[in-house]
């Protein structure tokens, strides 16, 4: 069992940066890949990026590639989503998730409660 708690969301102007954190509890955290997803109002939850259990492999959606970076600190049981050059279309609730990995929501069994990111133009 893994419990996930996101933090770091907020309001930022276009072009700005935010770093989201996802703290995990549970001794099996290090064995899971971690994913970030987001959901904008009226839209389906979509894949943002993922990092392997070792941290050695990352993969991003085309919409955030080159702007967002995922990292993990296993000693702190924390995963980060560094978001740069933010755009108004990045506005959404951001969720972290734990599971075997991949881009599909169904691949992740454990989810956080989400944190709101709002980018003003």
Image (spheres, rainbow, N blue to C red):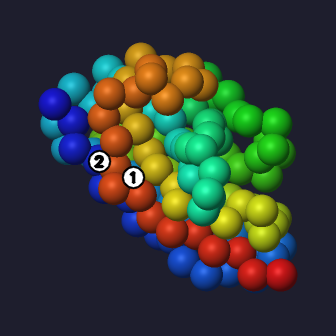
Residue 66, percent from left and from top:
83, 45
In the image shown, does 75 or 95 lie closer to the viewer? 95
Residue 105, percent from left and from top:
49, 29
Which residue in the structure is indicated by mark 2? 4
Q: Badge 1: how crowded within 10 Å, few (<14), some, or many (20+)?
A: many
Q: Is residue 72 left or right of residue 78?
A: right
51 w.r.t. 37: above or below:
above
In the image shown, does 102 or 56 lie closer to the viewer? 102
Which residue in the structure is indicated by mark 1? 22
**Marks 1/2: CA distance?**
6 Å
Tell me the residue at 58%/69% (across/down).
117
In the image shown, does 111 or 4 lie closer to the viewer? 111
> From the image, which quarter does the N terminus lie in?
top left
Tell me the residue at 47%/41% (across/down).
72
Number of callouts? 2
Residue 75, percent from left and from top:
31, 41
Q: Is residue 100 left or right of residue 31?
A: right
Q: Can residue 36 be seen by looking at this rendering?
A: yes
Q: Badge 2: how crowded within 10 Å, few (<14), some, or many (20+)?
A: many
50 w.r.t. 77: above or below:
above
Name which of mark 1 and mark 2 comes first in the sequence.
2
Secondary element at image label 1: strand
Secondary element at image label 2: strand
> From the image, which quarter does the C terminus lie in?
bottom right
Tell me the residue at 32%/27% (across/down).
109
Q: Can residue 54 be seen by looking at this rendering?
A: no
The answer to whether mark 1 and mark 2 are in CB contact below 8 A is yes
109 w.r.t. 87: above or below:
above
119 w.r.t. 53: above or below:
below
């Amino acid at each position: 069992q893994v419990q996930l708690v996101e933090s770091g969301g907020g309001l930022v102007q276009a072009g700005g940066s935010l770093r989201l954190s996802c703290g995990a509890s549970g001794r099996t955290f290090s064995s899971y890949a971690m994913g970030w997803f987001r959901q904008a109002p009226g839209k389906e939850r979509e894949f943002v990026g993922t990092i392997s259990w070792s941290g050695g492999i990352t993969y991003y959606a085309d919409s955030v590639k080159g702007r967002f970076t995922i990292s993990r600190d296993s000693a702190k049981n924390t995963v980060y989503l560094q978001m740069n050059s933010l755009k108004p279309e990045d506005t959404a609730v951001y969720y972290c998730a734990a599971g075997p990995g991949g881009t599909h929501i169904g691949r992740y069994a454990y989810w956080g409660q989400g944190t709101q990111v709002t980018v003003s133009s």
